[in-house]
Image (cartoon, helix red, strand yellow):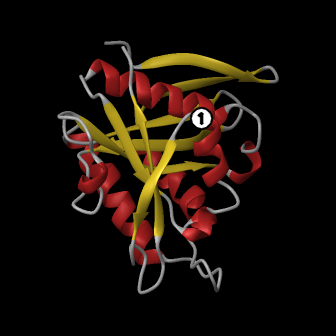
Amino acid sequence: MVDSQSEHTEGLNPIQIRLLRQDDIEIIRPILECWIRHWETGDIIPEEIDEIIKEMENSINNPNISTYLVAETPLDGVIGVVGFRPPTQEMLPFVTVDKATELTNFYVAEKHRGGKGIGTSLLNAIEQRAVKRGYEQIVLNSGPRYKETAWGFYDKMGYARVGEVKDMYGPGVHAPVWSKTLTK
């Protein structure tokens, strides 16, 4: 299987999508620190970042359970990451097929988001990889801290809002859930 593919170009800086490697982890940490913040205070949440990093490291050792892809450019290096894994317990009520996966930890470096094609390239690549593995559905949730940045993106990319996980991110902090049927 080819490990890298060229997607879009950001100006003359082509975007490559490839599997996450161990040497990407510390490069990804600042991207996570930009986004993983308390939705009310704006404080970085180091415990959550460490948990995500651990999940990413585990995916390198066992890509058949969870898989992460990164977007990179020759000039900027790694500028985005996204993963998929078996649906968590909270997401199972939204699964409608026998073979579903959950999109997780989708982040693009702040200066590279907003209509530059990075998020679209990553999402298309993860969907293609999921189809190759036989998945028929992707489910995902997104917390309130991403209301202005991610929610509309998922809507635009053909994901349908199918419900909400109550108290997903703490008491009274609910998470909308999206789903998309994958086609071969």
Farthest residue to the right: give it. Answer: 11
Q: Which quarter of the rendered picture does the N terminus lie within?
A: top left
Q: Is residue 74 visible?
A: yes
Q: Is residue 116 left or right of residue 165?
A: right
- Location of residue 175 in the rendering, given as x and y in whole percent from the top left corner: 47, 66
- Location of residue 33 in the rendering, given as x and y in whole percent from the top left corner: 57, 66
Residue 164 or residue 35, whichever sits in front: 164
Q: Residue at x 50, y 77 (%)?
A: 45
**Where does label 1 land, which residue?**
157
Tell me the element at label 1. loop
Q: Is residue 51 left or right of residue 134?
A: right
The answer to whether 57 is drawn above or below residue 49 in the figure is above
Q: Which residue is drawn at 46% across and 84% down?
A: 172
Q: Is residue 20 visible?
A: no
- Amino acid type, mark 1: Met
Residue 162 or residue 183, whichever sits in front: 162
Q: Which residue is drawn at 38% across and 26% down?
A: 182
- Location of residue 26 in the rendering, given as x and y in whole percent from the top left corner: 48, 54
Residue 34 or residue 139, whichever sits in front: 139
**Figure quadrant of residue 21:** top left
